[in-house]
Image: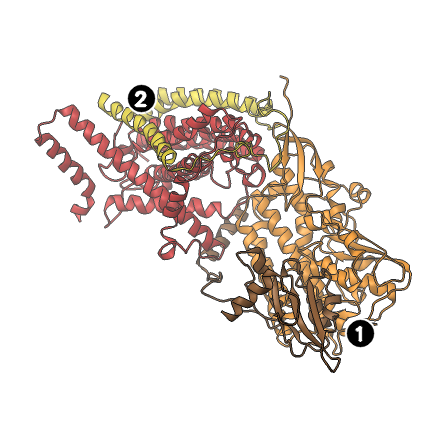
């Protein structure tokens, strides 16, 4: 019997496209035969905005890239400017930066994992990670006064030192994390329905992952051991002892598991950082007017979502001549159109969620 | 205690004698009694549905470490009242492209099978509207009609999400009908009667959940699928199909679907109580109260499941139904048949 | 007997009336402000692409056929289940043969891939 | 065994069902606000030296500062407005202030009913400066009243 395909819009106003992403999908019955992603509903022209802001003034804008990982975005940007200018960062600030970046990784993965499981239909599984994330946000707001957009990192260090009560609270949180992750494994990871829904679904092969330039947990789930923290250590990451989880099959389940294990590894890094945390200032010697020499620089760090890189061209003025951002969510999203082929509508949603995109970053 | 035990039966008998005393003909008295029963059942059903909406939200909240709705009235008890008022005064939108007649008819019809099924539910000893001699058979026949309104709604909305949802609803209900019917067959084989009151009466010594544990399990799974509740809520499929078959429904039309969902939940829990959990049997407390407790426990279990599990994918659902539940329920019938026969002939 | 089914008929009538009554209440109370945009089909905020009512692949055609077979079987099984305790050994074995034939059919359908959702 | 994961999940949710609820009953129960909270802005107008550092630090240019000069050629403030509508609440202005006269308050309920109320008139001396815009007047009237 001859059947016709139907074309359906998933998004921009859809419960599980993680913002205003639109996927025009062709369906043969329940099965997707192809799709086109439509981007740009949240485009704010951040790269262009940077050209009319001074270097420090652009820091708050980086918060709005991947708004679930503002701290890491800050870090990537300020490190790029530091690299351009050759600014030394005090030891204490370096350690605190690691602590905050790793806390941010946990917070971001909590949302990534939670929303992924929610898109599979388990609504309760989104509430528990958000409760854990809330504790991280408390730590952040205690330090810098913000809960979503922190604007904490400064060129040459940090805006504030940590308050006194921070470290005990952090210790408490790290101990809490162990039970929290165990509980989550109990609720989700062993669940047969969850396994049936995720194992073998939306496979990204090693070759595909590399040719699409994926990064972060998505590429590590496909068997490529690439973590910027290990491959091109930035800051003081070479001083810490941690593992990079790598899975082989590249399905949605592996992408979920990589995130779960990365959270444990982040806890390890934070514990080491607390142990070695030196005393001292948190803001180094920085010129009052930040005016980098003419030239260009690229620097990338391992963001929770993948490799976040900033490319800055300076003409010697206090404002960047050109700024480009390698946004991991945007690059990771590229593979979507290819891997949804042949999967059912429900899987398409699961695959999209397993890529863990944030539209603020995709659209820039 | 016996007064309480037969409270509703006594009331019904009183009404009947009063009506006969007024000199009404037999047929008119019977008619009046049926209307009385109907009013009672509708009252119970709607109250239950309204309360369950709140209970469900409270349970969801408690599982998610929230208090649930707690603003309207003490502990949020008037939340559903507020919701009902809102739904009643909502603008009713019928999409321009929809098939208007079918679109209108679907929510009207969605409650009918449920109301019909309630006619044979024994809420207590003697508390049954029409104790037809093919009770359980009638129940199965009627409840399988529930598919049609969903298909009507899905098709007539002229919305792709609704269409997919409607198709899924049919696939799911068709597949889980078979294991559900077979699981109930085991009980019928033991009792040797289709009458609901006889089935409950047969459980005075031992509940059938102990004799038919596998059938009970199959029934619970199939019933969850039959009333489209998570983890089998694929016709609604919120994360992929937005709201599935209900996408285009607003106001009271949507509320009727919602009402039907909860009424169905009560229905399947009541059937589980009747068929497996000994119906109104229980010590000390009045029978209807036991029935209420058992049904509530079943409802809690269904809600608890809903707020724990991810959604099953449509093909897994079909595979699970046909490749696991159907063979299992067939095997259950075989074993029950042999068991009952051995018990009868050898007296073992 | 007839009265029992008459009662069921009444339940049916009232069931339908109930639905219409609810809608009528809504009709009396609701605001009526139609607008062209409100009447559009919902598709995530975009205009719908293409027709919805097309020849559309439903995957459960084979399931539906097997379902039909099993539903008919149920009709036979229920009367048997009620009386097989009285009918004795012959009815017992005969029904099992009937069931066995169905199991074979079920197995065949399984083998032929009727239960594969493509 | 197949199905044990499902049972484990049910056990966890049942445990959570009976454990303590953590929701904050917001309007009755006030949340704890950290000392470094970036809420509304506060200006110590006497300490302000009108150096324009905050104005220059702002990425979005939301601060309007007007000043005059007295007989000793010292600057004094005549108007200070923050257009909170476009404020990122990044705190760069607070950091830039050399006299620490611009501070964040822990006031966090910044939602208003009208768009004009969003704008924050921190100081306005009507005698000394040009007529203020309506929103600054409104804020002042509120403070007086």
Residue B309 lies, with reference to residue C45, above or below; the image says: below
On whether disc 1 and disc 2 are found on a single subunit, the reply is no
Residue A138 lies, with reference to residue C104, above or below; the image says: below
Residue C61 lies, with reference to residue B240, above or below; the image says: above
Q: CA distance from mark 1 to mark 2?
A: 96 Å
Which residue is tagged 2?
C87
Which quadrant is the N terminus of chain A positioned in?
top right
- Kindly tell me whether residue A144 is visible in this rendering: no
The hue of chain C in the figure is yellow
Q: Residue at x 54, y 27 (%)?
A: B158
Instruction: Residue C79: name its quadrant.
Output: top left
Q: Position of residue C2 (x, y in %)?
A: 23, 21
Q: Which class describes the residues within 10 Å of circle 1: few (<14), some (14-19), or many (20+)?
A: some
Of B216 and A53, which appears nearest the observer?
A53
Determine whether the residue tagged by mark 2 lies in a helix, strand or loop.
Answer: helix
Q: Position of residue C111 (x, y in %)?
A: 59, 24
Q: Residue at x 64, y 51 (%)?
A: A112
The hue of chain D in the figure is brown
Determine whether the residue tagged by mark 1 lies in a helix, strand or loop.
Answer: loop
Contact, mark 1 vs mark 2 (Cβ under 8 Å): no
The hue of chain B in the figure is red
Q: Say which of marks 1 and 2 sits in front.
A: 1
**Chain identifier of the orange chain:** A
Of D4 and B136, which appears nearest the observer?
B136
Q: Residue at x 33, y 24 (%)?
A: C84
Residue B27 lies, with reference to residue A135, above or below; the image says: above
Instruction: Residue B215: name its quadrant.
Output: top left
Q: What is the tally of numbered marks visible in this picture?
A: 2
Marker disc for residue A284 = 1
């Amino acid at each position: 019997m001859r059947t016709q395909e139907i074309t359906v819009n998933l998004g921009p106003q859809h419960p599980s496209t993680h913002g205003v992403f639109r996927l025009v999908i062709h369906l043969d019955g329940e099965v997707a035969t192809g799709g086109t992603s439509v981007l740009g509903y949240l485009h704010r022209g951040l790269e262009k905005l940077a050209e009319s802001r001074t270097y420090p003034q652009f820091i708050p804008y980086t918060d709005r890239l991947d708004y679930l990982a503002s701290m890491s975005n800050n870090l990537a940007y300020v490190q790029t400017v530091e690299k351009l200018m050759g600014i030394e960062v005090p030891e204490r600030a370096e350690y605190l930066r690691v602590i905050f970046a790793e806390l941010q990784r946990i917070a971001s993965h909590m949302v990534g994992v939670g929303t992924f499981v929610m898109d599979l239909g388990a609504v309760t599984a989104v509430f528990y990670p958000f409760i854990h994330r809330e504790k991280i946000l408390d730590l952040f707001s205690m330090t810098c006064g913000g809960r979503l957009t922190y604007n904490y990192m400064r060129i040459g260090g940090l805006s504030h030192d940590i308050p006194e009560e921070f470290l005990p609270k952090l210790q408490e949180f790290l101990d809490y994390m162990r039970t929290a992750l165990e509980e989550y494994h109990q609720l989700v990871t062993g669940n047969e329905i969850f396994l049936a829904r995720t194992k073998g679904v939306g496979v990204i092969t090693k070759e595909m992952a590399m040719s699409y330039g994926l990064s972060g947990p998505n590429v590590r789930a496909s068997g490529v051991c690439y973590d910027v923290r290990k491959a091109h250590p930035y800051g003081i990451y070479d001083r810490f002892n941690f593992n990079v989880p790598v899975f082989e099959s590249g399905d949605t389940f592996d992408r979920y598991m990589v995130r779960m294990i990365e959270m444990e590894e982040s806890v390890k890094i934070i514990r080491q950082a607390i142990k070695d945390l030196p005393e001292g200032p948190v803001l180094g010697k920085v010129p009052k007017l930040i005016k980098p020499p003419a030239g260009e620089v690229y620097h990338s760090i391992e963001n929770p979502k993948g490799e976040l890189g900033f490319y800055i061209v300076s003409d010697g003025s206090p404002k960047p001549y050109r700024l480009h951002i390698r946004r991991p969510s945007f690059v990771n999203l590229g593979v979507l159109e290819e891997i949804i082929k042949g999967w059912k509508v429900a899987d398409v949603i699961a695959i999209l969620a397993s890529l863990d995109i944030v539209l603020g970053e995709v659209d820039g | 205690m016996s007064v309480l035990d037969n409270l509703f039966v006594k009331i019904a008998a009183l009404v009947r004698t009063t009506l006969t005393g007024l000199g009404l003909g037999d047929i008119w008295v019977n008619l009046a009694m049926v209307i009385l029963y109907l009013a009672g059942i509708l009252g119970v059903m709607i109250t239950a549905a309204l309360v369950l909406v709140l209970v469900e939200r409270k349970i969801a909240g408690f599982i998610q470490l929230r208090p649930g709705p707690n603003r309207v009235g003490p502990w949020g008890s008037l939340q559903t009242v507020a919701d009902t008022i809102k739904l009643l005064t909502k603008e009713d939108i019928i999409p321009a492209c929809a098939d208007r007649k079918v679109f209108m008819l679907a929510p009207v019809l969605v409650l009918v099978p449920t109301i019909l099924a309630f006619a044979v539910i024994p809420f207590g000893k003697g508390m049954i509207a029409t104790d037809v001699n093919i009770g359980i058979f009638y129940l199965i026949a009627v409840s399988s009609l529930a598919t049609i309104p969903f298909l009507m709604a899905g098709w007539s909305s002229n919305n792709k999400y609704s269409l997919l949802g409607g198709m899924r609803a049919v696939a799911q209900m068709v597949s889980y009908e078979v294991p559900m019917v077979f699981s109930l067959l085991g009980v019928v084989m033991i009792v040797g009667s289709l009458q609901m009151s006889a089935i409950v009466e047969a459980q005075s010594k031992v509940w059938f959940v102990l004799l038919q544990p596998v059938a009970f399990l199959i029934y619970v799974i199939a019933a969850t699928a039959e009333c489209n509740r998570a983890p089998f809520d694929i016709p609604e499929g919120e994360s992929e199909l937005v709201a599935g078959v209900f996408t285009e429904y607003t106001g009271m039309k949507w509320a009727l679907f919602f009402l039907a969902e909860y009424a169905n939940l009560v229905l399947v829990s009541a059937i589980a109580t009747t068929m497996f959990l000994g119906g109104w049997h229980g010590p000390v407390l009045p029978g209807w109260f036991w029935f209420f407790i058992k049904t509530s426990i079943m409802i809690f279990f269904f809600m608890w499941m809903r707020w724990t599990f991810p959604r099953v994918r449509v093909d897994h659902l079909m595979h699970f139904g046909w490749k696991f539940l159907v063979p299992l329920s067939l095997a259950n019938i075989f074993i029950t048949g042999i068991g009952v026969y051995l018990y009868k002939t050898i007296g073992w | 007997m007839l009265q029992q089914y008459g009662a069921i008929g009444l339940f049916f009538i009232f069931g339908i009336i109930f639905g219409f009554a609810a809608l009528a209440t809504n009709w009396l109370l609701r605001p009526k402000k139609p607008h062209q945009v409100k009447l559009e089909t919902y598709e995530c905020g975009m205009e719908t692409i293409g027709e919805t009512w097309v020849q559309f692949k439903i995957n459960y055609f084979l399931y539906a056929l097997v379902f039909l077979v099993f539903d008919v079987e149920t009709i036979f099984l229920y009367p048997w289940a009620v009386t097989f305790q009285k009918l004795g050994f012959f009815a017992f074995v005969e029904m099992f043969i009937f069931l066995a034939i169905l199991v074979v059919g079920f197995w065949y359908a399984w083998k032929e891939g009727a239960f594969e959702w493509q | 065994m197949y199905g044990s994961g499902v049972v484990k999940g049910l056990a966890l949710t049942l445990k959570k069902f009976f454990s303590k609820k953590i929701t904050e009953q917001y309007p009755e129960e006030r949340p704890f606000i950290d000392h470094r909270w970036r809420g509304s802005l506060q200006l110590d107008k006497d300490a302000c030296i009108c150096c324009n550092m905050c104005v220059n630090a702002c990425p979005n240019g939301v601060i309007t500062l007007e000043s005059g000069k007295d007989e000793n050629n010292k600057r004094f403030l005549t108007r200070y407005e923050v257009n909170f509508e476009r404020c990122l609440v990044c705190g760069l202005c607070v950091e830039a202030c050399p006299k620490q006269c611009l501070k964040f308050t822990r006031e966090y309920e910044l939602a208003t009913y009208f768009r004009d109320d969003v704008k924050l008139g921190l100081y306005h001396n009507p005698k000394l400066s040009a007529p203020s815009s309506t929103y600054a007047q409104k804020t002042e009237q509120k403070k007086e009243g």
